Image: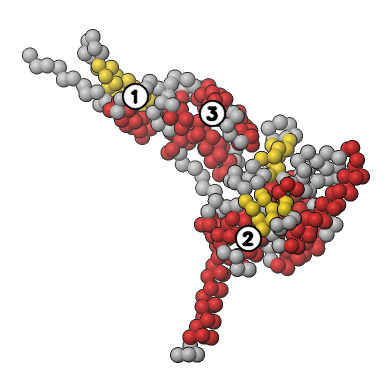
């Protein structure tokens, strides 16, 4: 009598079911009492999805790290993940962003799906839905980035075998072309801003390359008049979690502080701001409330507002003949001006707070191309003056 062939532990198969789903089956082990194979199944909307899960399951079985997949829903896991792995750990603004993403986008689309059944196809449909709603590529990627972080944690905990977010295709964000101001436009803008309540903020953004939130969040403890430098380590952020939103003080975009050596004319401007603020404080008396010790405040010491700053800038830019200019273009103008005046890329990167010099070069490619031409011309001048004459 021929012995019945015993299925190998970890072996698997894939088939297309009549209901349209794909099923991957694998052998987890054998019942010690009967010797029968213990088979498990995973399902997905595409063959590729179940093939990946099958491969992960077989590897876990082979390495004796296999765990049963969690039966909890995506919605329940997102709640648990947020409370356990995010709250009290991540920065406040990131927390609020995640809470909003989970509530507005992830739960409505995916909450009822079991975590172990979530597929790349499910997430790709969410991407398409967000696109139809007119969400920008950056927003789409932020939504899926939040989901991926939650799923990756579930994978790390052994609750699921793979992260279906890894294979999602995202819409490509078109790189916005940098539009720095010309020297003439800078002069016109500064003249148009004269007397405006946001004049000093615009001045600092232009000549220090600060982001809007960094300028509005600049405090006096960050300004060192003796050493002529400022430390950029925080930004004023506006949240929209509740009706009307509110402001918080948060870290810089990359979470790192940077020290900026600045020329005397900037320190002179900041000194004048301090003197005017002291007068405002005397006038306000007990009503003065500058809780963060900010450099730029209203007449009672309150912080300035992002949207109000934008409105003032729009009015000033229009008067200067550059109506399409944005506040952020002041930062671009600073970078371009620095490179054009001979600052090396590493210095500009540090002053702007970019992660890498490569990003700075890519962002300001037009200016860097001109720098290459200038370098070639300087070499030509050197050759003509020093080498060719002696040859």
What numbered label is drawn on residue 28? none
Q: Nearer the viewer, residue 345 or 50?
A: 345
Which residue is label 1 attached to?
Answer: 66
Check disc 1 and report its element: helix, strand or loop. loop
Name which residue lies at 89% across and 49% down: 279
**In contact (CB < 8 Å): disc 1 and disc 3:** no
Name which residue lies at 50% across and 34% down: 149
Image quadrant holding the C terminus, namely bottom left
Q: Is residue 174 above or below residue 347?
A: above
Q: Is residue 188 above or below residue 85?
A: below
Name which residue lies at 38% across and 32% down: 49
Query: Counting residues from the N terminus, which is met first, the one under dot 1 or under dot 3?
Result: 1
Q: Is residue 44 above or below residue 343?
A: above
Name which residue lies at 81% across and 61% down: 192
Which residue is label 2 attached to?
Answer: 335
What numbered label is drawn on residue 85? 3
Check disc 3 and report its element: helix, strand or loop. helix
Q: Is residue 289 above or below residue 195?
A: above
Check disc 2 and report its element: helix, strand or loop. helix
Tell me if 340 is positioned left or right of 15 in this view. Answer: right
Marks 2 and 1 sit apart, C-alpha to C-alpha, by 53 Å
Q: Is residue 102 visible?
A: no
Q: Nearer the viewer, residue 129 or 107?
A: 107
Query: Counting residues from the N terminus, which is met first, the one under dot 2 or under dot 3?
Result: 3
Query: Counting residues from the N terminus, which is met first, the one under dot 2 or under dot 1?
Result: 1
Q: Quadrant of residue 271?
A: bottom right
Q: Residue furthest left?
A: 1
Marks 1 and 3 sit apart, C-alpha to C-alpha, by 23 Å
């Amino acid at each position: 009598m021929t012995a019945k062939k015993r299925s190998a532990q970890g072996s698997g198969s894939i088939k297309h079911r009549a209901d349209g789903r794909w099923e991957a089956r694998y052998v987890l082990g054998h019942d010690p009492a009967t010797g029968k194979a213990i088979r498990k199944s995973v399902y997905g909307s595409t063959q590729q999805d179940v093939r990946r899960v099958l491969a992960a399951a077989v590897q876990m079985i082979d390495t004796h790290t296999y765990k049963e997949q969690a039966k909890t829903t995506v919605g329940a896991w997102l709640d648990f993940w947020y409370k356990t792995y995010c709250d009290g750990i991540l920065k406040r603004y990131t927390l609020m962003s995640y809470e909003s993403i989970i509530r507005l986008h992830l739960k409505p689309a995916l909450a009822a799906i079991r975590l172990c059944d979530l597929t790349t196809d499910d997430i790709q449909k969410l991407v398409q839905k967000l696109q139809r709603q007119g969400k920008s590529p950056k927003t789409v990627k932020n939504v899926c980035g939040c989901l991926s972080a939650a799923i990756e944690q579930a994978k790390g905990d052994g609750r699921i075998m793979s992260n279906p977010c890894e294979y999602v295709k995202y819409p490509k964000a078109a790189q916005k072309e940098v539009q720095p101001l010309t020297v003439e436009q800078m002069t016109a803008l500064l003249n148009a801003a004269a007397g405006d309540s946001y004049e000093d903020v615009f001045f600092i953004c232009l000549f220090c390359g600060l982001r809007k939130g960094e300028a509005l969040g600049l405090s006096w403890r960050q300004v060192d008049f003796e050493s002529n430098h400022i430390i950029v380590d925080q930004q004023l952020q506006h949240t929209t979690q509740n009706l009307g939103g509110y402001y918080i003080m948060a870290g810089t975009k990359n979470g790192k502080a940077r020290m900026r050596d600045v020329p005397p004319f900037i320190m002179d401007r900041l000194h004048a701001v301090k003197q005017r603020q002291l007068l405002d404080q005397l006038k306000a008396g007990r009503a003065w409330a500058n809780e963060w010790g900010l450099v730029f405040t209203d007449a009672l010491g309150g912080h300035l507002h992002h949207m109000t700053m934008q409105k003032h800038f729009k009015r000033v830019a229009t008067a200067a003949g550059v109506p399409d200019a944005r506040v952020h273009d002041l930062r671009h103008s600073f970078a371009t001006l620095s490179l054009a005046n001979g600052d090396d890329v590493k210095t500009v990167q540090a002053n702007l707070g970019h992660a890498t010099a490569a990003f700075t070069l890519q962002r300001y490619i037009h200016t860097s191309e001109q720098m290459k031409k200038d370098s070639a011309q300087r070499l030509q001048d050197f050759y003509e003056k020093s080498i060719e004459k002696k040859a």
